[in-house]
Amino acid sequence: MWYLCVFYHRLLDYRKPEVESLAQLFGANEDHQNGRVPSQLQWKFPLRYHPDSPFHFVNLPSEQLARNIATRSILVKGMYELWGEGTSYEELKESVLSYPDERKLPYLDSDSTFKITVDSFGKVISLEEQKELIQGLSYIPFKGRVKLKNPDHNFWLIEVDNYGGNNGLPPIVQKRVFFGREVGGADRKLIPTYQLKSRTYLGPTAMDAEMAFLMANQALATSGKLVFDPFVGTGSILVAAAHFGAMTMGADIDIRVVRDGRGPDCNVWSNFKQYGLPMPVGLLRADNNLPAWRPSLKEVFDAIICDPPYGVRAGGRKSGGRKLLKGAVEPYIVPDDKRTDHIPSTAPYSLVECVHDLLDLAAKMLVMGGRLVFFYPILREDDFAETHFPEHPCFKLISTSEQILSSRYSRVLLTMVKTGPYTEEIAEVARIKHIQFKENHVKWLEDGNLHSAVFSPAAAQLTEAVDPKFIKDPKPKYRGKYV
Amino acid sequence: MRLLTHNMLSSNIKGVVNGFPLRIEAEKVVEMNVEKNIEFLKKMFEKIDWKAFVDASQAMGYTELPKEADSSMLNSDEFFNRFHHALLELHLEEGALVCPETGRRFPVNKGIPNMLLHEDEV
């Protein structure tokens, strides 16, 4: 059945992938069990709509599934059984009246309670107008009692009109009115509950709550699954996975972050305790470049979720000193009496190498059909269409969601599904590549230096001294993915 | 550190061939209640190296696990309780993991094993 799916107008690229992922989580198809790529849902737009519009139609096999998806989601404002639509209130009336009675009457009977909400997109409807609009629905035989708090049935009247003016929203060609019965909607209360400003232990790159939940949804985090974050930091991503019931495990190269935090009640453990969530089943200090997993262990994690250090806000580190990897010095032999408290030196870790290690680890350690969800930075000067995302023979990329961070760069959330087993050949190729990285450490660091690309002076823009009146309107008419 | 983590780790010092299982030196072991999740336990049972797991539980002072186990035991509640307890409720708070080949000690402080290698070990 087709449901009207109305999104929040934010994080545009993340909205459909979230619904697709949740459809799979709640069993819209069983394909993923054996590592096949999940089949896509059917989507369509209302007539003549901008693709970034919040209004979509999605075909789902059952109302229960639609409800499950909507209530677990972060970006679905509401999923509705549409009773009617039109370009005017007259057309809406005709459309609702022609909608079959057997679909409507069960929700209108005298034993039930209901509420009608008037909503709009891009403009405000005054309370007076709302009242008029609700009274205009008298052609629907509501027999139940009105109840504003927790009614049995929620009905929505949603009006979309050309708002004119420059408010940064996608253009709307034609007025449209929808009337439908709510099946479910996102629990956005999660976001203030988990917001970072009330989190006890924070780091400079803690993932904000909304994004962490979206990542956990992309990873299909749920009870009985084991989720791993190799760059755990303060645990901000795992907190979201644990909220959805997953068992969590994290590693980080920085002992100060994972072990010490900022005192006994301000560390990674306390971030879980704060929300009454189960503690991670394991936290360890380890190097993503030289993982300490037992060689015979494979296919143990259901998902790997992370925000790898890509050198803009925080740089990655790996084992081995800078001079050591350059070959300038021989390895420092730690005297026996100093071994216990010795802090080994680390060297910068290039993004390319970091992603290579991550894919290799995920290919080996994820179960078939397991998901790898991580952020990948891109420079916005590059044409987005030509961006090459990392690839691996064991993985199929199923969604890319861009979030613009500055005029220079974006981060893209990549969701990959493990579709092929980790074979001897793949392991051997990865081993050779690992050695190549080690030998050409300095070269990789220079090539992959995102920090300098993001923060270098904008030469082109400075030299072009143009008459101010020719400078384009700094606020574009439609802001697209900036929201 | 719980025994699930212990069972997943090995010593990855350059040149070490058999870095698994790491021997546990327990200084402080604490027990914490963890909600039992049957589905999760069943999955982990498939992945666990049982002998290393039994040895590790003994090093932590828990001796209730059978020497050998196969999946038919998963029908027994009693077995599940013991498996669950040893896998997730015993925490090595302070101590060390010792590489079976070189004797190198990986310290465990505040429940977190430090698996990072020294410069001359990578």
Image (cartoon, coloured by chain):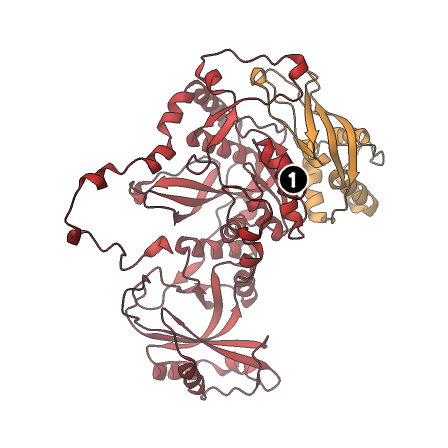
Chain colours: A red, B orange
Determine whether A58 is above or below A387 in the image. below
From the viewer's perspective, is A45 left or right of A230? left
From the viewer's perspective, is A271 left or right of A101? right
Chain to which mark 1 belongs: A
Q: Residue B60 falls in which quadrant of the image?
A: top right
From the viewer's perspective, is B60 left or right of A304? right
- Residue A334 seen anywhere in this rendered image of the structure: yes
* Disc 1 secondary structure class: loop
The residue pinned by badge 1 equals: A263
- Residue at the spot 22% in from the left edge and 40% down from the top edge: A462
From the viewer's perspective, is B91 left or right of A45? right
A468 or A182: nearer the viewer: A468
Determine whether A175 is above or below A442 in the image. below
- Residue A30 seen anywhere in this rendered image of the structure: no
Give the quarter of the figure containing the C terminus of chain A. bottom left
A104 or A267: nearer the viewer: A267
